[in-house]
């Protein structure tokens, strides 16, 4: 898998003694865009000012970068910096964060775990993409250590989480805002690109707190994202999964926004699952439509995530609660160890590819 001119994800980097600024990854280097393109928008410490320029600017800038990297490299070469010499930063200022629940396989597994013998899906699940509003202030860049949260574990019980979990997700980064009262227009007019997300989850805290209003402290302590945002324009698209019943009018797909992305989850360097994004039930354009149909506004830097990516097979589950069936069937690792949930010192890495493109990875260590 390559980091070539068909990819060119954006990120924010810094060199020792210099301010953070925007670049794109090319091979094992980062192209310093402020200097290569002579555009001060890329001297900002986040992608937000550039993303706010809109779809035409995104397209034209991408074409310009591709031309510079495939033409005479005598000038461009001096602005390519080896990745080993830079520090990657959070790529955008996160305005709002929404997390969805769009995998029918994940939702069904969770329903079977917690409501055995009952219908796995709640009555509303096939009618709308379920989501909740998260905490933008604890979205962190890949490599940031993740502390074990503490909270209420039941009536009269308080302490550190004992069921610390991960969720492999795909995040969508908004560039162009909307005004209050105006639902979003075409998906590609608002969404700049995608980034990998690990939605760390405290399952024991979640089980006690989530009725009746949903996740709160179990999700708000940390959400990790990749340092790279892959432009929407680079991603191959496929038809979305069939849906039954037919969605409400505002959710009916007007373009193919299924994505054929292969995800891999590694625990301490060992692959434990390979979830396929193509199995997702609700597509990202439907997430955006639902998120704004009531008139809620978008802001530049909004992040909305897909929810756990899981497929129909046991080896395609995107969280430990599914992979170990809530701890009843521990994972057996190659070195002889087992895991139900995460232990201190464990490192989780999520990486993904789309066709011949790599979407990078997001990683974090507990403790």
Image (tube, rainbow, N blue to C red):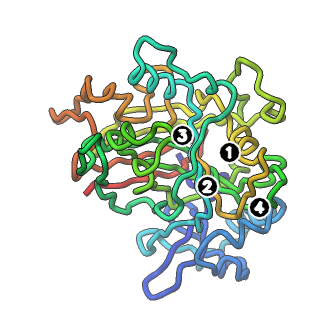
Q: Residue furthest left?
A: 336
Q: Position of residue 322 (x, y in %)?
A: 38, 28
Query: Residue 307's mark?
Result: 3
* Residue 314 appears anywhere in the view: no
> Residue at left 31%, top 44%?
164
Q: Residue furthest front?
A: 156
Quarter holding the C terminus is bottom left
Q: Residue furthest bottom?
A: 17
Q: Nearer the viewer, residue 235 or 173?
A: 173
Could you tell which of marks 2 and 1 lies nearer the N-terminus? 1
Could you tell which of marks 3 and 4 lies nearer the N-terminus? 4
Residue 61's place in the image compared with 43, above or below, is above
Could you tell which of marks 2 and 4 lies nearer the N-terminus? 4
The quadrant holding residue 248 is top right
Q: In what element is the residue under mark 4?
A: loop
Distance from the alpha carbon under mark 2 to that under mark 1: 18 Å
Q: Residues within 10 Å of mark 2 (few under 14, many from 20)?
A: many
The quadrant holding residue 100 is top right
> Residue at left 58%, top 55%?
97
* Residue 309 appears anywhere in the view: yes
Q: Label 2, on which residue?
A: 303
Distance from the alpha carbon under mark 1 to that under mark 3: 19 Å
Could you tell which of marks 1 and 3 lies nearer the N-terminus? 1
Q: Label 1, on which residue?
A: 235
Q: Nearer the viewer, residue 38 or 191?
A: 191
Badge 2 vs badge 4, beta-carbon distance below 8 Å:
no
Q: Label 4, on which residue?
A: 177
């Amino acid at each position: 898998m390559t980091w070539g001119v068909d990819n060119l994800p954006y990120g924010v980097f810094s060199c020792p003694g210099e301010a953070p600024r925007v670049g794109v990854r090319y091979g094992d280097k980062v192209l310093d865009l402020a200097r290569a393109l002579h555009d001060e928008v890329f001297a900002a410490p986040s992608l937000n000012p550039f993303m706010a320029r809109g779809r035409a600017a995104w397209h034209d800038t991408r074409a310009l970068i591709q031309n510079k990297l495939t033409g005479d490299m005598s000038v461009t070469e001096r602005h390519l910096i080896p990745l080993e010499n830079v520090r990657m930063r959070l790529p955008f200022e996160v305005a709002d964060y929404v997390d969805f629940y769009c995998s029918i396989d994940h939702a069904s597994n969770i329903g079977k775990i917690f409501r055995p013998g009952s219908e796995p899906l709640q009555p509303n699940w096939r009618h709308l993409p379920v989501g909740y509003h998260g905490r933008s202030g604890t979205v962190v860049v890949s490599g940031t250590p993740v502390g074990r949260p503490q909270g209420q574990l039941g009536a009269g019980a308080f302490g550190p989480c004992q069921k610390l979990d991960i969720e492999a997700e795909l995040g969508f980064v908004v560039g162009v805002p909307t005004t209050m009262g105006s639902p979003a227009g075409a998906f590609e007019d608002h969404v700049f690109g995608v980034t990998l997300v690990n939605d760390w989850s405290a399952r024991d805290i979640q089980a006690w707190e989530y009725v009746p209003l949903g996740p709160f402290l179990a999700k708000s302590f940390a959400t990790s994202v990749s340092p790279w945002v892959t432009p929407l324009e680079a991603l191959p698209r496929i038809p979305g999964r069939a849906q039954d019943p037919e969605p409400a009018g505002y959710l009916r797909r007007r373009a193919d926004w299924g994505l054929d992305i292969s995800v891999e989850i590694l625990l301490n360097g060992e692959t434990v699952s390979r979830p396929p994004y193509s199995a997702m039930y609700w597509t990202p354009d439907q997430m955006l439509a639902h998120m704004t149909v009531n008139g809620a506004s978008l802001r530049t830097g909004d992040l909305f995530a897909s929810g756990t990516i899981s497929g129909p097979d046991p080896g395609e589950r995107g969280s430990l609660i599914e992979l170990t069936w809530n701890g009843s069937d521990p994972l057996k690792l190659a070195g002889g160890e087992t895991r139900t949930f995460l232990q201190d010192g464990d490192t989780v890495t999520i990486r993904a590819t789309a066709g011949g493109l790599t979407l990078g990875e997001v990683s974090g260590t507990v403790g």
